[in-house]
Amino acid sequence: MIKICIDSGHGGNDPGAVGHGVKEKDYTLKISQYQAKRLKEHGFKVVMTRETDTTLSNSTRTTRVKNSGAKVCISNHVNAATPSASGAETIHSIYSNGKLANMILDELVKEGFKRRRAFSKKGKRGDYYFMHRQTGSVETVIVEHGFITNAGDVQKLKNNWKKFAEADVKAICKYMGVKYIPEKNPTPSKSSSKLYRVQTGAFSKRNNADNLVKELKKKGYDAIVVKQGNLYKVQTGAFSKRENADNLVVQLKKDGFEAFVI
Ligand SMILES: [Zn+2]
């Protein structure tokens, strides 16, 4: 049996990144628990660094990974930066060829995250990140599932965190040469149901719509211009759940935009 280690970033006293009403530690745990279940379904043996909302010191965490006997470890995280930064990135050890990190990034991009990069970083004592430096021979990849500081990414996480968790599972299967079995009951595809769209403006001049999009993007929102009749409408999101659209409207209003659900 091939062993895989799943590290759920942060936890307990350490919330990780916080933004837009969500905590990194909650998403890393949800993603990790889901991945553990899915990897077991594929016949892997799974070791987790934490299974609940508990505090782990860096050394406890890395010792668990190091002693897990796992081939690879996925360290789940959500990034933080300025509001405009968005997308997925993966970080591998300077001693790794980066193959797994690139495969995971590819799958995350297929599920809708903007591609940032798969990279490694050198520090004074070898690897820069302790998750690489202190985990021995376990091939550890840090996976950043979007940015908690970016409104668009947080919406993506809220709606699609399972899909992103599944993307990592798919990449691990491919990398380990294990046949990937799609999830039996995936969340129903959104295209089949009604979508609730959030509109932030409607203009007769394209230029005005483009300016609003620029302003929205500066604040970290995903926005597009949709032409309908003679009007250029600015949309910041489309959701299958009314609740998610309503939440975005509240957020937009807080940031000083006019917004409503159509
Ligand atoms: Zn983190």
Image (tube, rainbow, N blue to C red):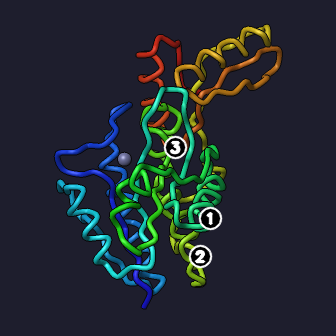
As displayed, is residue 200 above or below residue 66? Answer: above
Mark 1 lies on a secondary structure that is: helix
Q: Amino acid at mark 1?
A: Met
Residue drawn at (26%, 70%) of the image: 64
Q: How many marks?
A: 3
Q: Residue furthest front?
A: 124
The first of marks 1 and 2 along the sequence is 1
Q: Nearer the viewer, residue 56 or 111?
A: 56
Q: Do callouts 1 and 2 mark residues in contact (Cβ within 8 Å)?
A: yes
| Mark toward the start of the polypeptide (1 vs 3) | 1
Please give the name of the residue rendered at 64% of the width and 52% of the height, measured from the top-left corner: 109
The amino acid type found where label 3 is placed reads Lys
Q: Which mark is residue 103?
A: 1
Please rate how many residues cluster around mark 1, counting C-alpha atoms within 10 Å: few if below 14, some from 14 to 19, many from 20.
some
Q: Position of residue 75 (x, y in %)?
A: 40, 60
**Where on the picture, by quarter, is residue 253?**
top left
- Amino acid found under the numbered disc labelled 2: Tyr
Q: Which residue is mark 2?
A: 175
